[in-house]
Amino acid sequence: MYRFVKAGKLSTVLIEKEFGKKVVTIIEELATIKQYDTLQSNSSAENFRKLFLSQITDIRVVLIKLAGQIYQMRTIFLHSIDKQKKIAGKLLTFTPLAHRLGLYN
């Protein structure tokens, strides 16, 4: 839904009417953290994690972002080598966060 809201094909008013305020809040938080969704170096991974976690109020936002990262890794072979490097680099930023939440194995 976030992508449809971002593209202007779906309004948050309609989403709130159909799904409630909590879903709108999640979408808004995804939009907020999207601006920090750039390739980070390993040295700033901890700073990124702190910034990321300070911006959200619902843990489901973290789970949605992590699920998105898993999806990207599963489909990484569809992209060019340069794009693959960017995706893998971004994953390195989210890996400590997933580990800290106990999402491993």
Image (cartoon, rainbow, N blue to C red):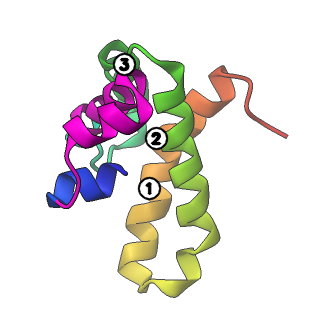
**Which amino acid type is marked by label 3?**
Ile
Residue 21 rendering spot, x and y as whole percentages: 35, 22
Farthest-out residue, left: 8
**Which amino acid type is marked by label 1?**
Gly
Q: What secondary structure is marked by label 1?
A: helix
Q: Earlier in the sequence, mark 3 or mark 1?
A: 3
Residue 76 visible? The answer is: yes
In screen coordinates, is 73 left or right of 52?
Answer: right
Task: Reply above or below: 75 against 45.
Answer: below
Farthest-out residue, front: 17
Residue 90 rendering spot, x and y as whole percentages: 42, 51
Residue 40 rendering spot, x and y as whole percentages: 33, 44
**Residue that numbered label 1 is attached to:** 89
**Residue that numbered label 2 is attached to:** 93
Residue 82, by quadrant, is bottom left
Residue 36 visible? The answer is: no
Q: Is residue 29 magenta?
A: yes
30 vs 2, nearest the viewer: 2
**Residue that numbered label 3 is attached to:** 56
The answer to whether marks 2 and 1 mark residues whose Cβ atoms lie closer than 8 Å is yes
Q: Main secondary structure of the magenta part?
A: helix
Mark 1 neighbour class, 10 Å CA radius: few under 14, some 14 to 19, many 20 or more? some
Q: What secondary structure is marked by label 2?
A: helix
What residue is drawn where x is 46% and y is 18%? 58
Task: State which quarter of the image contains the C terminus.
Answer: top right
User: What span is in magenta?
Assistant: 9-32
